[in-house]
Image: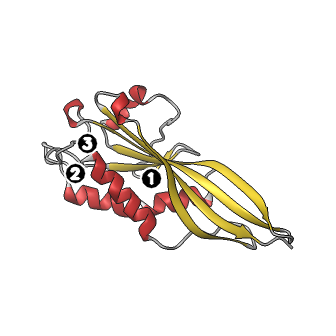
Amino acid sequence: MSSTEVDWVLDQLASVVSSVATDYTLENGDDVVIKRVDRDDSRIYEGSQAVDMTTPIRSRSGELQSGVFVSAGSADVSQSPIGTEFDLDVERVVSLRAEGLHHSEWGHVDPDGTNGVPFGELQDRIRSALYGARTYPDAGRTGTSYTHLLLTNEADLSSEYADFYDWRVDVAFDGFEELP
């Protein structure tokens, strides 16, 4: 089951999906496709199929030929007491991952942008979409609200592969819970 935070992150990335399709094409004239994936339930937003994001990236090369996957899943929840009351500092973390295949292997990523989206620009668009909202999801519990988010633990693992692009970052929602 997906969390409110995962749904919010994927909803914010809708603008990235549409802007990349508008701005970049493949050599056959098709638009570059970005597919948002909810890793908590393996659901793909752009399409009706499901994908198992727990398998290694190399085993998903066929799926990555259909587009760049930007996936989100619940990662961590932490709570700590604040002061002498029964209030809590709350942090929820959503793990975000962008994965693509180089255009020479029939993928949608091209470093110079002539036959796909440059991966660095995709990362920048994702960051801008998440930070640009300046609103945060409903925490789903009475008395709990988020005050800010932070992108943290960024890791570009692309150098580990010849034809695959793999970027990971955590989206940390920080807030407070007032307990009765």
Q: Is residue 61 above or below residue 156?
A: above
Residue at mark 3: 109
| 62 with respect to 105 (left or right) | right
Q: Nearer the viewer, residue 109 or 156?
A: 156
Could you tell whether 20 is left or right of 42 in the image? left
Q: Secondary structure at mark 1?
A: loop
Mark 1: give few (<14), some (14-19) or many (20+) Cα within 10 Å.
some
- Residue type, numbered disc 3: Val
Given residues 37 and 148, the one toward you in this image is 148
Instruction: Give the residue displayed 58% in from the left and 45% down from the top.
Output: 41
Query: Is any atom of residue 157 visible in this view?
Result: yes
Q: Earlier in the sequence, mark 1 or mark 2?
A: 2
The colour scheme is secondary structure
Q: Amino acid at mark 2?
A: Asp
Q: Position of residue 113 (x, y in %)?
A: 18, 48
- Reading the image, the residue beneath label 1 is 45
The CA distance from mark 3 to mark 2 is: 12 Å
Q: CA distance from mark 3 to mark 1?
A: 20 Å
Looking at the rendered image, the disc whose residue lies closer to the viewer, 3 or 1, is 3
The earlier-in-sequence mark between 3 and 1 is: 1
Residue positioned 35% across, 35% down in the render: 158
Label drawn at residue 31: 2
Instruction: Look at the image and tell me whether residue 14 can be seen.
Output: no
| Tag nearer the camera, 3 or 2 | 3
Q: Is residue 164 left or right of residue 145?
A: left
Q: Earlier in the sequence, mark 3 or mark 2?
A: 2
User: Residue 43: horizontal and vertical position, in percent?
Assistant: 51, 46
